Amino acid sequence: MFDQLSDRLQATLSTVSSRGKLTEDGVDKAMREIRLALLEADVNFKVVKAFTTRVKERCLGADVMGSLNPGQQVVKIVNEELTELMGGAGRDLVFSNRGTTVIMMAGLQGSGKTTACAKLAKLLTKEGKRVAIAACDVYRPAAIQQLETVGKRAGAVVYQQGTDVDPVEIAGWALDKAKDENRDVLIIDTAGRLHIDTELMDELVRIRKVVKPHNVLLVVDAMTGQDAVGVAESFSDSAEFDGVIISKLDGDARGGAALSVKAVTGKPIIFASTGEKLEDFDRFHPDRMSSRILGMGDVLSLIEKAEEQVSEEDAEELQKKMAEETFTLEDFLKQMRQIRKMGPIGNLMGMMPGMGAMKGLKDVDIDDGELDRVEAIILSMTPYERAYPEIIKGSRRRRIAEGSGTKIQAVNNMVKQFGQMRTLMKQMANGKMPDPQQLARMQGGKAAKAPRPKIRRR
């Protein structure tokens, strides 16, 4: 979503950083570029004006102008102000000390509210909480069936009384049921409308009075740009929500909603939905998002995702296998599956510092279908072949190719590259730098040779 904004900001700040001395004229030019980048990203124009004014004032301060490296100071200021723009420190939900924590969800129809209920339930269930969801959207066709389907996948129980009961009654009944069953969390999926109206707001107010929620979350669709900010502003006047869940943050919209909603409504973004799967849902950290936009990566989120999939014991065992060169195709398959559970490979690359600035890598379209083909090839092998891939010759390769629906050449390449990778992993596990010639061969090319010195004859 932030790709275009990220490119513009990184290019502008790179130009500033390359200058040895910072002048007021240079700051003005940089602010002009930053202003255009934010406006093109569909950020609210009042927010843009206030943002660039603050950045300029800080850039022209004595600490920056007198710094040995003013360019780096400007990058630091922009990073800090972007973080503040999106809410500063990340905020979490308020949980009840005892009894059931109630979370009420609001939003317009089509904003992804029902799916967000399931994603939040999945996240909280993974953290060890017993979650229930109340189906209070009785107006939209098949809303209850949809909630039951995704709720079950999320590991939550869904309370519903059909479409003929008043949503306020359903909410009260669901809360009593959640308390009786000692549920840790009750998420209330309220009805959305195609537009904001008095009836919708009145229903939200009545449900709120009955269940007295600890958190009211507004779901806004990032793809709608400034319309999402307008919706949030309208809900803020009537529904008194505590925070925002921004959905479809993985889309190709320009990101203006994520950068504007806190400044306009005063309410922070608490969660962000970053994909179609229930697992693609995370707490929103403004400082980490700012770092990613500026090409500094998001190492903390990357570590957190890795720790969810790989235990300390597994990591130590992997290190040992790499060092002893006993890493098998079975181990490789396990690691590949763990990495894929962390999310799309492209998203993971975006979390690595400096990756966005590396030419070529940034625009690589990583095909998950290719990973599927690799997995199919490995699964078509016998356990013995996975442990000792060097035995895979002629007839074995033909059988594996037929079993995986690929060509013999694909099997040949995979086996060859795995052998090279295993050798490389052994070198790195033992603290050795990889051989450039070997890296080039793995990429299908040749390493550049140093030019031979010219000998002048007398």
Image (tube, rainbow, N blue to C red):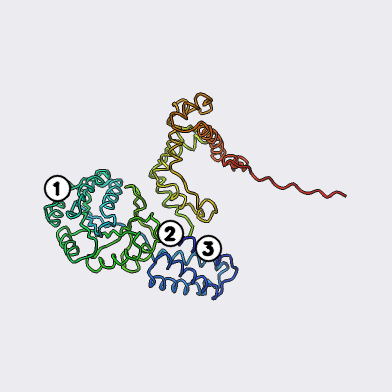
The kind of residue tagged 1 is Asp
Q: Residues within 10 Å of mark 2 (few under 14, many from 20)?
A: many
Whether 455 is drawn above or below 268: the answer is above
- The mark found on residue 257 in the picture is none
Give the alpha-carbon distance from disc 1 to disc 3, as whole Å: 58 Å
94 with respect to 4 (left or right): left
- Which label sits in the foreground, 1 or 2? 2
Residue that mark 1 sits on: 180
Neighbourhood count class around disc 3 (C-alpha, 10 Å): few under 14, some 14–19, many 20 upward: some
Mark 1 and mark 2 lie on one chain; the one further toward the N terminus is 2
Give how far apart the Cα atoms at labels 3 and 2 are.
14 Å
Residue bearing the label numbered 2? 2
Q: Nearer the viewer, residue 272 or 308?
A: 272
Residue 329 percent across, percent down from the top left:
47, 32
Q: Residue at x 22, y 67 (%)?
A: 238
Q: Nearer the viewer, residue 357 or 91?
A: 357
Residue 115 at x, y = what percent? 28, 51
Nearest-to-viewer mark from 1 and 3: 3
Look at the numbered discs 1 and 3 and tell me whether their residues touch, using CB distance below 8 Å: no
Question: Where does the image place residue 123, in percent across and percent down from the top left?
Answer: 30, 49
> Helix, strand or loop at disc 1?
helix
**Closer to the N terminus: mark 1 or mark 3?**
3
Counting residues from the start of the chain, the first of labels 3 and 2 encountered is: 2
Q: Secondary structure at mark 2?
A: loop
Which residue in the protein does label 3 denote?
A: 11
Q: Amino acid at mark 3?
A: Ala
> Residue 93 at what x, y percent from top left?
28, 57
